[in-house]
Image (cartoon, rainbow, N blue to C red):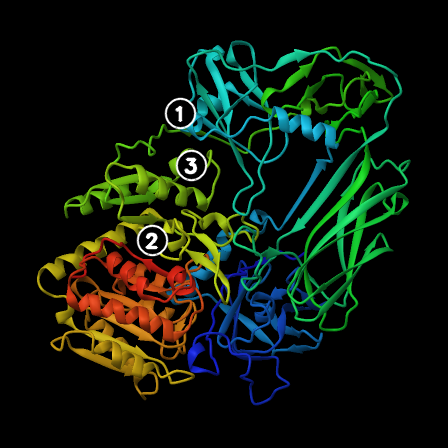
Amino acid sequence: MKKGFVLLVLFNFILLLASPSAAQRLNLNIKPKDENISVKYTGIEAITDGQGTLIKWSTEFEGENLGFNIYRISADGAQLVNSTIIAGAYLQMRGNQFFGKTYTYFDAEGDLSSTYYVESININGQKATSNLFSSKYLGNLPAPDAELFEAFKRGPESTKNPSISKNEVNIPEELQSEVAQSAVQADFDKQRWVAAQPGVKIGVQKEGIYRVTRAELQAAGFTNNSPALWQLYVNGVEQSIIVGGNGDYIEFYGKGVDTNEANTQIYFLVVGTQNGKRIANTFRRAIRSPVASNSYLQSFTFKERTIYSSGIYNGDDKANFFGRVIGDTTQTIPLNLAAVDFGIATSSINISLQGVTQVSHQVRVSLNGTQVGVVNGFSTSFMNQTFTFPTSVLREGANSLQLTSIGGSQDVSFFDTVNINYARQFQAAQNRLSFYTPNYRAVYLRGFSSPNIRVFDISSPDNVSLVANLQIQQNGSSYQVYLPSNRGRIMYAVENSGILQAASIVSNTPSTISAATRNGDLVIISYKDWMTEAENWANNRRASGLSVEVVNIEDVYDEFNYGVFSSNAIRSFLEYAKNNWQTKPKYALLLGDATLDPRNYTGNGLYNYIPTKMVETIYLETGSDEALADFDNDGLSEIAIGRIPAHDAQDVTRALNKVSVFEQTLALGQGLERGVIFASDLPIGYDFAAVNARLATKLPTSTSKTFINRSATDAHTQLITQINSGKFMVSYSGHGSTEIWGDAAFFGINDAAQLTNGGSKLSLFTMLSCLNGYFMQPVDSLSETLLKNQNGGAVAAWSSTGLTTPDVQEIMATQFYTQLAAGNMTRFGDLIKDSKTVIPGGRDVRLSWALLGDPTLKVR
């Protein structure tokens, strides 16, 4: 398989429409002159530094285009570079056409001698190829392209997590009832006590018995010498543990989590005021018949997460990542099954697929070449069906699942998940075995490499016990454990070499952000490595008369989600602070970038410093910081919120310096007096110049207004010149994407990166367009580029992360400019929050308009 991975989230759209009420949404009626063209390219290039090649291509038009393949030409002919199809507009956006979209792919094996071509595939299976193009040397690229190249270089293939596989015991109903009765509910109050204690946080990603040594604990800052007082907590509930002699190690039973945002469960080790819970011995004595059971029921699960589709509506609580595309060419998915009990006649398979095309779906499901059923569905529905088949179809070890669409050439769907339910023998894998014992049946646990075997009763996970009277026997070259018949129990067996190591062990800095005595007009939530810079920002705001609380994002997770990474933890914290703090926050500032890929499926999830909330709007799923402060779910945030999408501490410092300089200039009377630029797009579907003309009337007559329309011969030059002259505000109305206003020749990220309006010439940017603020991708959007420009650009940018219509945008903007001119609201965040209150219902514009900047920024 070729090394390389797709940055799936560069949604660079220019969005056209046929009616005035939907000027910036997708238009299904516009076609190129040649209706047989599925893709029309505007540019293709490959750049390299000799150690990998970045392929970048842009489309002017995509009609029913599923996606792309990249081929590298070599002495052996054309070689496919990408392992899975690179999703085109149809897959990403529910079949809508797009204009002005840019794609990128990194070929780790490319160099200066590499030659490529791009292949597009439409929903009818028709393919078309681009012209050949060759690599060129990296050289002096514009900043956005250079950062793009480096982003790929920093995200090696080994960091990708494109699939999830796990084995889970299918617990019988009577045991499920017992487990439910013994379960201890998560305890928020206890968790907040735990978070306030010094100790360590232990990250666990899968089921097993874990050992953490004294050396590992000490390396994380845990040096307490009173092992009897050591207590381990998860979800605010104390766990039973084993403490080795003199505190040389701890052992415990742990499990990971599987949410949209996290796969790591956090266990807290602290020092209590009384002895901690310990794993006690239990004894299993024979009851009734000694007849042995050969197997138990298990489910093998495989999920694939390779394509992000923002156009699938499956609810805010479900991720929009899916697996490979299923069409009329058979897709074969390798699966590995262990210890199959072929003495049980039947097994079952459950298949989950996501419809893509708006037709009826029929997907043939085969296992190892034997058809077991057909999954049926319609349009963009989620499809889930279960089929029973003879266990003889399965194989020990390698199995293959074949999926083929048989509903016609336009029958296209995503693979999501497969579950195979079968009887599994009591056979250890890698010296571990998770299982249950059937009621009053003896079992032999086989396949361990040494007699150093322990069996734990995990029927009550919070009160694990150790079975003490084991009968361990040699069985050929391996060892087995005999468990006499008794009541059914859920158990976990492990030989010493099968004990797991924690995914992470870090110090827990005590926190008390839930204390009601906190005072903060402004709360700053910062990534943990930038707390010094966050305090600098707080001191700047305190000097202006605001009370400020600085909060480490880790403390938010610890106190409001039991230590587990989650955007909902931020929402819960802000709502708690708003309702309980002595001084209730009016503003929130997030210091850190976010991504739509928190599980790092694509290898780029390392940039999720402060997560955002992914929400569904009318046209797509997108990121919303406003949703983090919308406590009553009406689409309006109760706290004015902004973000500095920083990748490092320097980004934070530079953004603060811009705020300081801008406000100093404002104090000298250089606000609206500096003038406003109103830039507009061509009147495609909506008269954007007229929008600007109406908005301009809301400003004082003394404010100079410069109007620049994209139709002007020298529009690009005029715009750059005027911005660099130091206008107070720059406003754009028109079509847009993550990278551009209207067209790259008018204004785009390369221009934004090269602006020179620094110092006293910095501007506020407001954008009545689509996607200019799409900050959830590893490479910066237009608004981020403006904010991070070291020599100028924006002090703050207010723009959309989604697709919305200009009529509603204008209502919001009219209120904003009216209040700006009135001067009653002096901070940017207050103006934004107020402007959204006049929008007549709906969540789209309210939730998708994001402030990249400080909500307490003085603008009057």
> Closest to the observer: 457 or 446?
457
Of the residues shown, which amino acid type is indicated by label 3? Phe
Side (left or right) of 818 relative to 353: left
Residue hosting label 1: 193
Give me the C-alpha separation between circle 2 and circle 3.
20 Å
Relative to 668, is 852 on the left or the right? right
Instruction: Report crowding for label 2: few under 14, some 14 to 19, many 20 or more residues within 10 A (C-alpha).
Output: many
Residue with the mark numbered 3: 560
Q: Distance of mark 1 from mark 2, alpha carbons?
A: 30 Å
Dot 2 falls on a residue whose secondary structure is: strand
636 vs 212, nearest the viewer: 636
Question: Which comes sooner in the sequence, label 2 or label 3?
Answer: 3
CA gap, disc 3 to disc 1? 12 Å
Q: Residue at x 31, y 31 (%)?
A: 515
The amino acid type found where label 1 is placed reads Trp
Quadrant where the C terminus is found in the figure: bottom left
Q: Secondary structure at mark 3?
A: helix
647 versus 672 height, above or below = above
Residue to which mark 2 is pinned: 643
Q: Amino acid at mark 2?
A: Arg
**Quadrant location of residue 143?**
bottom left
Question: Residue 858 appears in which quarter of the rendering?
Answer: bottom left
Left or right: residue 326 compared with residue 638: right
Horizontal side of 595 relative to 432 (left or right) equals left
Q: Secondary structure at mark 1?
A: helix
Mark 1 and mark 2 lie on one chain; the one further toward the N terminus is 1
Outermost residue, left direction?
668
Characterize the local packing of mark 1: few (<14), some (14-19) or many (20 or more) Cα atoms within 10 angstroms: some
